[in-house]
Image (cartoon, coloured by chain):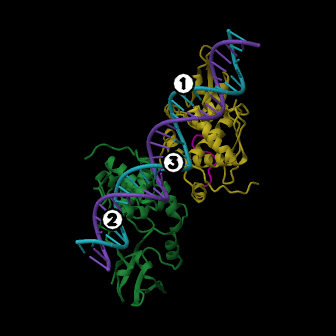
Chain colours: A green, B yellow, C purple, D cyan
Amino acid sequence: MTNKLNLNNLTKSEEDYLKAIFQLLIEDASVKVGNNQLADYLKVSPASTNNMIKKLKAKGYVVSEKYGKLELTEEGKSVAVRLIRKHRLWETFLCNYLNFTWDEVHDVAEQLEHIKSRKLIDELDRFMDFPKKDPHGEVIPNANGEYSIIPKITLSSLSEGDVCQLIAVNDGSVHFLKYVSEIGLALSSEIKILEVREFDKSIRIKFDNTIETVTRKFADNVFVNKVV
Amino acid sequence: MTNKLNLNNLTKSEEDYLKAIFQLLIEDASVKVGNNQLADYLKVSPASTNNMIKKLKAKGYVVSEKYGKLELTEEGKSVAVRLIRKHRLWETFLCNYLNFTWDEVHDVAEQLEHIKSRKLIDELDRFMDFPKKDPHGEVIPNANGEYSIIPKITLSSLSEGDVCQLIAVNDGSVHFLKYVSEIGLALSSEIKILEVREFDKSIRIKFDNTIETVTRKFADNVFVNKVV
DNA sequence: TAAAAAAGTTAGTTATGACTAACAAATTAA
DNA sequence: TTAATTTGTTAGTCATAACTAACTTTTTTA
């Protein structure tokens, strides 16, 4: 009920930091998210993050004690979710209307998500008829910042004989995304685990009559629904 | 034939300055465009423009002598035209697909024109089937930066009895754009000059069975084709 | 043509957001 | 439980791009 609308008085950098903290908090659930971890994630120095954290605390977006873990206020979360909404809507637009491929969208969406216009993003949403998921399978928050959390398990968590459906991929690496589409995997692909090799945890999978061996690292970035 | 592709290593500010110089040079044809004029146009101090001009000269986008007039190199013009292309394509998208009105598009397009992605803008162009003019009637440069210059005359340059067609409006002021659409004028409206009042140069016009009196200042910002 | 006005320049300051280097606190391991 | 390592903080620097104030050059006009 903080009615201070904070009409987007945030710089691009401030927005980037809030989004990064939000995403680290999701990834590691309730594990401590610290200053150095944030610096690593954003590829800046710990001194830079330390500085920005101070500013975001002063502005009421971040809470943390000295030497303690980082947390977001409701206001901070709200900013982050709005950024994620924008990012995912733009990715959807780029893929579905402008012929962008999975691996091409991220960098451009990273720029577009900082455009400040409520009307722009809500109209884009309407234009695409309110898509529920982005091209990588991630849920798109609605105009009120509401979104459902779909419990995701990684391909690497399954065992021999399991059958699953690809529901999302980690969009953090262009190389990975290229790789995924090059071997022919796509959203909704049905994947069967043929074998998990004890030696290096590599996994032999079958999908669409293709048989491939993927590494543990690869499987960690593929999110699935277990079917059988 | 400068093949140094200058892969958009320009900051948002540098781009803004180049575009501003380009537009001042068009508006006043071959008249001197100076430092203070640029500062006025961009609403910054003359010291700021002076500083930026130095940088842009060093980078090879601007040419000028000390205390002399500003000019753009081919490279500088090319950057400006690409920005104008982006601006006008985005305005077209916002109006034609996202329900934006004339007066709402400018600010958002001003942000969108700085997004760096060749593919994005060329695909947007294709998606809209290569529009030739933006919503204000201005010509959109093509992917090679080529564009035709349509000689524009202002409504204020006509005389009693003349008939003309509205082909473009100056998009510099939100208030003006709102005003234009509120009285019912739109692109292609046929306008007849009923009377030009000697006292204050106000003009009585008729269009679509509407009769209105507009000021000289208003008429200076309306561009037309003379029909009769 | 000399004084006034306008236009352009320079110097020095500020805020943002990076950085490195040095140091302090907390955690982990011996 | 002390030592080593990791994590976090502080101080000071740099680049960008804005600013004011002071000054110089150019142009205008009286």
Q: Residue at x 37, y 63 (%)?
A: A23
Q: Earlier in the sequence, mark 1 or mark 3?
A: 3
In which chain is the residue bearing label 2? A
Front of the two marks 2 and 3: 2
The answer for how far apart the CA atoms under marks 2 and 3 are is 34 Å
| Relative to B127, A141 lies left or right | left
Front of the two marks 1 and 3: 3
Measured from the top left, where is residue C27 in percent x and y? 29, 69
Q: Residues within 10 Å of mark 3 (few under 14, many from 20)?
A: many
B133 part of magenta stretch? yes
Q: Residue at x 61, y 16 (%)?
A: B197
User: In terms of image quadrants, where is residue B45?
Assistant: top right
Q: What span is in magenta?
A: B129-136
* Amino acid type shown at disc 3: Leu
Q: Residue at x 70, y 39 (%)?
A: B150
Residue B147 versus residue A100 in the image, above or below: above
Residue B212's disc is: 1
Measured from the top left, where is residue A85 in percent x and y? 40, 57
Dot 3 falls on a residue whose secondary structure is: helix
Residue beneath label 3, please? B94
Dot 1 falls on a residue whose secondary structure is: strand
**Can the viewer see residue A3 in this picture?**
yes
* Amino acid type shown at disc 2: Ile
Q: Do residues under tags 2 and 3 come within 8 Å of each other at their CB atoms?
A: no
Residue B94 versus residue B70 in the image, above or below: below
Pick the front one: B140 or B15: B15
In which chain is the residue bearing label 3? B
| Relative to D24, B171 lies left or right | left
User: In terms of image quadrants, where is residue B161?
Assistant: top right
User: In terms of image quadrants, where is residue B151?
Assistant: top right
Residue beneath label 2, please? A26
